[in-house]
Amino acid sequence: MKAHVSSILLGVRDLEQSKRFYSEGLGWKVRQDYGISVFFEPDGGSPVGFYGRDGLADQVGTSPEGSGFSGLVLTYVVRSESRVDEIIAEAEKAGATILKPAGALPWGGYGGSFADLDGYIWSLAYSAQGKDQPYAE
């Protein structure tokens, strides 16, 4: 198995609400909407999609119940502190819960984090030392 993620599929409680959060709130463009799942334009990275939480749990053979920190954090790297601030503000306006406001990070970078409507955690970060980051916005 290669060190690569083909796509990221998140189980959500309300597909339409999550679709609005990411498309209207954060500006993501829908690539394919199958009714039971939706995928967004990958814009150079791995495709991200949503599937009903119960259906996705059933598909992979587990329970949809659970709460707290799952150990999964989605990371988004940008090329400036101001872009971190902009995205945190967009997410908050769209209804996200800000977990850590944008600011200096212990390792020397700048970032913040938020939880989307289903509790998925997004970590935003910028590092002045990060010169070779083709994945950064």
Image (cartoon, helix red, strand yellow):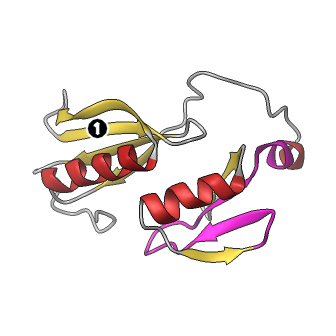
Quadrant location of the N terminus? bottom right
What amino acid is labelled 1 in the image? Gly
Between 134 and 84, the residue placed more toward the observer is 84
36 with respect to 92 (left or right): right
At label 1, counting other C-alpha atoms closer than 10 Å, the crowd grade (few under 14, some 14-19, many 20 or more) is: many
Up-down: is 108 above or below 7? above
Q: Is residue 55 magenta?
A: yes
User: Is residue 2 something one can see in this rendering?
Assistant: no
33 with respect to 91 (left or right): right
111 with respect to 30 (left or right): left
Q: Which residues are magenta?
A: 34-57
SS for tag 1? strand
At horizontal 62% and vertical 65% (from top left) the residue drawn is 6
At horizontal 45% and vertical 41% (from top left) the residue drawn is 96
Quadrant location of the C terminus? bottom left
At horizontal 35% and vertical 37% (from top left) the residue drawn is 113
Q: Is residue 102 magenta?
A: no
x, y percent for residue 42? 51, 72
User: Is residue 81 something one can see in this rendering?
Assistant: yes
73 with respect to 13 (left or right): left
Q: Which residue is mark 1?
A: 112
x, y percent for residue 23? 51, 65
Between 137 and 93, the residue placed more toward the observer is 93
Label total for image: 1
At horizontal 21% and vertical 63% (from top left) the residue drawn is 132
Query: Which quadrant of the structure image shows residue 53?
Result: top right
